[in-house]
Image (cartoon, rainbow, N blue to C red):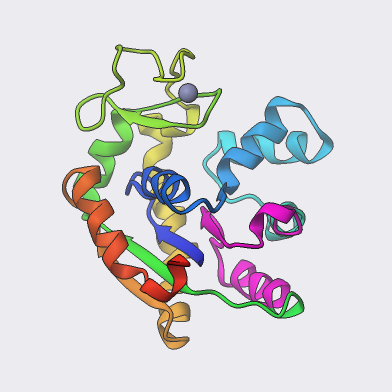
Amino acid sequence: MRLIFLGAPGVGKGTQAARLSKLHGVPHIATGDMLRSAVARKTPAGLAVKSYLDEGRLVPDSVVIDIVRERLDEADTRAGFVLDGFPRTVGQANALADVLIKKKSELTRALFFSLDESALVERIAGRQSCPACSAVYHLVHYPPKRKGVCDCGAMLIHRKDDAPETVKSRLAVYHNETAPLIQYYQAKNLLIQVDAAGTPEMVASRVEAAIPASACGG
Ligand SMILES: [Zn+2]
């Protein structure tokens, strides 16, 4: 299965991608995590993207495309992948299509997670992330077993780009840059809308229903 997960920041697609990855044994490729890791390691690409992430702006297509292209060349993507956070622009979607054509491969589905804006803001404000394993929790809706500590044992952090003042700018960027992808994948007959309201378990069963059985490899 080769899936992309679309939706606004805070919609819960990272949680669903991580779950699906475990269940079906395909890598969860979270471009946000890949970029943040490059920033933390202070690689040349990392230093270049730091200012964009801090300000809630989109990282330039060319940087993101290079990172994703390299990742899709790794052997563990042969059985498929779940792309979370990419593509974010039509330019990135076209680049992804080129990469897949060269691999004689194609997308299975594009899942669009939908949720109203007030619910999005509430979800992002309560979010805590694990810097070690990239798990994402929510103070109210999806708490870790121990307060402030990931189930993997690492201390949780509130990401800088989840701060209330950057949330509004992230949602504005999303509406301008990413929303056109919904029409893009609809035109290719790949889009399925998933209602992202409710508990992670409720959303997970909608995700399963949205994936064709033929893509699950039995
Ligand atoms: Zn963790």
Q: Is residue 196 visible?
A: no
- Looking at the rendering, which quadrant does residue 165 occupy? top left
Residue positioned 42% across, 61% down in the render: 6
User: Relative to 160, is 201 above or below?
Assistant: below
Q: Is residue 170 left or right of residue 59?
A: left
Q: Is residue 29 left or right of residue 114?
A: right
Residue positioned 38% across, 42% down in the render: 15
Query: x%, y% of residue 167?
Result: 38, 40
Depth check: give the residue in front, 168 or 201.
201
Q: Which residues are magenta?
A: 71-100
Q: Is residue 153 left or right of residue 74?
A: left
Query: x%, y% of residue 62?
Result: 74, 59
Residue positioned 47% across, 80% down in the render: 184
User: Relative to 135, is 35 above or below?
Assistant: below
In the rendered image, which quarter contains the C terminus? bottom left
Query: x%, y% of residue 35?
Result: 65, 40
Depth check: give the residue in front, 132 or 180.
132
Residue positioned 39% across, 13% down in the render: 149
Q: Is residue 32 magenta?
A: no
